[in-house]
Image (spheres, rainbow, N blue to C red):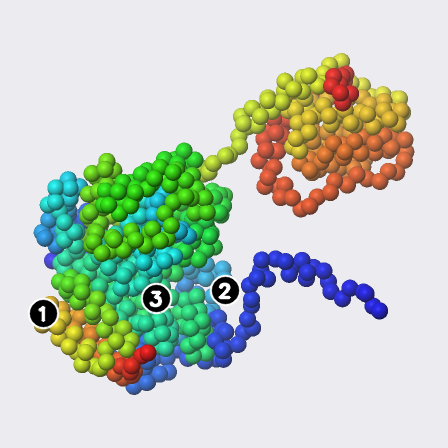
Amino acid sequence: MNDAPNRWKRFADWDERPLRLDKFAVEDWKNGFAAFSSPADPKPGVTIKGGRVVSLDGVAEHDFDMIDRFIASYHLDPEVAPEAMAMPSEDVARMLVDMHVPREKLTRLAHGMTPAKLADVVSRLNALEIAFAYSKMRARKTPGNQGHVTNAKDDPLQLAADAAIAVALGFDEVETTMRVARNAWSNAVACAIGAAVGRWGTLFQCSSEEAEELQIGMAGFTSYAETVSVYGTEKTFVDGDDTPWSKAFLAAAYASRGIKMRCTSGAGSELLMGFHESKSLLYLEARCLCLQRGMGVQGTQKGSDLICSGMGSILAYDNSFNPSLINGEELEDYLVLQRDFEADGGLTPISEGQSLDVRARGIAALSAVYEELGLATATDAMKASVLVASGSDETKSFNPRDVAMISEAIKARGITVIDVIKALAKRGFRAEAENLLNVVKLRISGDYLQTSAMVRDGKIVSAVNDPNTYAGPGSGYRLTDERRREIMGIRDVLDQKEVLRSEAQHQAQEARNIDYRELGEAAASSDAKDVVIGISPAFGLKLFQTTAGHKLSDVLSVMVEEIKRRSLKPRIVRFRHTADTSFLGLSAARLAGSGVGIGIQAKGTAVIHQKDRLPHHNLELFSNAPITRLEHYRGLGANAAAYALSEMPEPVVVPTRGEAMGSRYHARVAMIYAIETAMTSEGAAPIEVAVTFKGAAS
Amino acid sequence: MSFGVKDYPLAEKHAAQIKGARGKSLSDITLDAVIDGSVTIEDLRITPSALEAQADVARSAGRPRLADNFLRAADLVAVPQDVIMRAYELLRPGRAKSKDDLLEMAKTMRDTYKAERIALFIEEAADVYEARGLFTKRY
C-alpha cells in the first residue's frame, strides 16, 4: 500500500479560496465563449451608394437584421465612414493612447466606424492602454459617482435614511430597485425624499419594468432611467421583449418628459440568453454601443458618465441589484483609496455625527410624508431601529407586504411629486421640499439631458460645459486644494499628539513599577560577567510600552532575570547619541566586559550584538515588535547570557503568521521613532542607569 | 435663433426664455407657488422649444444623434401618456399583429399630434418588422 501523498497541498489551499467558487469556461467560440475575438466575427467593411449604406460588415442590405438596419440608418455617418473605415485599425488604436490626439478627433472617426471596425480597433489595446484610453475618452472632465440604495425589505424608512447617507457621501446619482415588483412606487418616493436631505442635485432613478419605470418618471419621482437594455443579436433583443425601434421610442419618450436616460448592455447577455451567433463578446458589445448611439441616448451605463455604474452604498445582502464589487462593507476602503492615491473617486468621507443627523432627517421626512398622505404611520420604535441599523437585518420596520400596500396606494391614487413636496413643506421639511422641487425643475430647461450631466453646487456640469480635455500630464481633471482636503478627511487618523497622549496614560502606572536612576557617564568594563542592555533615548522617559503593548518595566525585568540566572551581571545603559537598534546593540556590546550587549528601543525592537561585528551584522534581531511577546524577550536575555558564556544557543524565532504589520503599525512606529530621534544629540555620552523594579515582577 | 455650446446651460444663460409647459418661467416656480397650488405638475414639464434648443446645443457639441432624439422627443411632448404607452407597447415584438397596426399608430401620431418625425419612425419600424417577420404570433 502506497500512502505517499500524490498532490501538492498548495492546491488544497487554493481550493479553499473564494476564487474557486467561480467557474471558468474554456474558450469555445462556436458556443459563444469568446471574449475579444471569434472566427465568426465579421471583417470590417462598409459600402455606401448615393449616401446610403448598402452593406455593413459583410452583410448586404437585403440581408440586414434589425440591428444592422438600425446601425446603418442611425449610427453610421456616411460622410465620415469612407475615411474612418480606410484607416488602419492599429493607427486608430494608437491615436486612442496618444495624448496629443484630442478626444473629438476620435469620436468623429467613431461615428464612421462599423461595429466590426470598432471591435478591431479596441482589440489591439492591452489592459493598460485600455485603461488610459478609457480615462482619456471619458466625456465629462469632473469625476462623479453613482450609488445603489436598496434593502432586502423594501423598507421605505431605511431607503430614506440610506439615500440621505448616499447624498452626504457625495454620490451624484442614486438608484434603487426592489425585491417585490409592486413596491416600485414606494421605493421611488422613499429615495426621492431621502435624496433631498442635505443638499439638492442628486439625481435619482428607480429601475423597474420599462413601462412602469416611465410612469414613475412621469409622476416626477425619478430624474433618470438607466437600465434600458439593448442586446447585440436580434434574437436576444426580441427575447428581451424589445426592438431597437421600441427602445429608441422609449428614449424619445423619456426625453419628452424631461427625464434623462442611458442604455445598458453587456455582461454577456447574448451568451446567457443563448443567441450569441458564435460572435465575440467584444463585437456584440460594439453592436450594442452603435445601437445606443444611434438611438441618441445621452450616455451608456457602462462607465462613460460615472466611475461606478452603481456602487453599493448599502450592505451586500441589502443590494437588490445583486451585490456590487464595492458595497457598504467596503465603502470606507474606497474612501481610503481615494486618499492614498490622491484620486477623486467622487465620494467624500462623512463623520459619525453627520451620518446620524442625515439619517434622522431622512427618516423623519419620510415618516411625515407617509403620514400626511395617509399612506402609513411609522412608530418611534421603527424609526429608532432604522436610525442606527447598518442593514435591514437589524431593523424592526416595514415589511415587504406593508410596502406593497403603500406602493399600490401611491400608484392608484395618482400621487405625484407635487403632493410629496407639499406634504414635506406642510410638515416642516421646507429645505427638503425646496431640494426636491429643484431637482424636478431641472426638467424644464432639459440642460441635464445632455451627455454626462450632473449637478454640482446647484449648477449643471456636463460634457457640454465641462468636456474632458485631457492632453497629457497637467491637463484634464486635477484635484483642487479644497477637494484634496476633502478626500484626505478620513476618520480616525493618528498624529504625534495622539501618540504622546496615549503614552502619557501609561506614565503614572510605570512610575509605580520601575525606577530609573541615572548614575553618570557609563564606561567600558573589563569584567567578563558584564552584559549591557542598551536602552533608547525615550525608553521609560516619554514612551512606556512596546508596540505589542508590553510594559517596558516587564520587558527589562525578564531580560535582567535571565542574565542573572546565568550568574552574569546585567548593566543598563541609556544611549543618547542614537536611537537605532543596531547601534544601540553594538554600543552596548562595546561597553560590556563580556563583549555581548542588547540594544532595545522603546517600541520593543531589539538586537543581541557583539563588540567586533559590523553594525548591521548582529547575533539575533527581534524586528517584529508588534508580535514579540514577553517570553521572546525572556529568550533574548537568556541567549545574550549564553553568548557571553561563549555558548551557541538556538536563536529565538518570533513566529509570524504573515500579519499585515506594515500597514497596521507603520504610522504609529514612525511617530514613536520620531519622538526617540528628537531626543538624540550628536556625541552625547551614554549614561549608566540603576534600575529598581518595584512591582511583583522584580 | 439657434443655440450652441456657448448658450449652455440654458437655465443659466437664457433663463428668461425657459418656460414650463403652461408658460411659467423658472423664477415663477417656487415652493410657495407649489404650496398655494398655482404651480402644478404640468408646470414642471419640458416644452418642444426647450427640446429643440437642447437639440441645437447637442448638435453644436458634436452629438447629432442625441440632437435627433431630442427632436423626436419634441414631437412626443404633446402626446398623452396613455398614447405613448400604447405606441411603445405596439413597437414591442409580436404586439402588432400586422404592419397595419403600426401604420395606424403612425397616422395617429401624424394627424392628431403633428408628430411627423415619430410617424416616420414608426413607419420605418413597420417596414423592418415586416422584413424580419416580427408580426408572427408570440406565445
Above/below status of B101 relative to B58: below
B112 vs A266, left or right, is left
Residue B74's x, y, as percent? 16, 63
Describe the element under mark 3 as helix, strand or loop: strand
To which residue does mark 3 refer?
A229
Q: Amino acid at mark 1?
A: Thr
Q: Is residue A115 left or right of residue A605?
A: left
Q: Residues within 10 Å of mark 1 (few under 14, many from 20)?
A: few
Q: CA distance from mark 1 to mark 2?
A: 54 Å
Tell me the chain of label 2.
A
Callouts 1 and 2 on one subunit = no
Whether labels 3 and 2 share one chain: yes
Q: Nearer the viewer, mark 1 or mark 2?
A: 1
The answer to which quarter of the image holds residue A113 is: bottom left
Mark 1 — residue? B112
Dot 3: within a 10 Å radius of its alpha carbon, few (fewer than 14), some, or many (20 or more) residues?
many
Which element type, helix, strand or loop, lies under badge 1? helix
Q: Residue at x 35, y 53 (%)?
A: A401
**Which of the two discs, 3 and 2, labels the residue nearer the N terminus?**
2
The residue to which callout 2 is attached is A126
Query: In the picture, which quadrant includes the N terminus of chain B?
Result: bottom left
Verify CB contact (< 8 Å) between mark 3 and mark 1.
no
Alpha carbon of mark 3 to alpha carbon of mark 1: how far?
31 Å
Q: Residue at x 39, y 78 (%)?
A: A44
Q: CA distance from mark 3 to mark 2?
A: 28 Å
The answer to whether mark 1 and mark 2 are in CB contact below 8 A is no
Amino acid identity at mark 2: Asn
Quick check: A572 above or below A336?
Answer: above
- Chain letter belonging to callout 3: A
Q: Chain of mark 1?
A: B
In the rendered image, which quarter contains the C terminus of chain B? bottom left
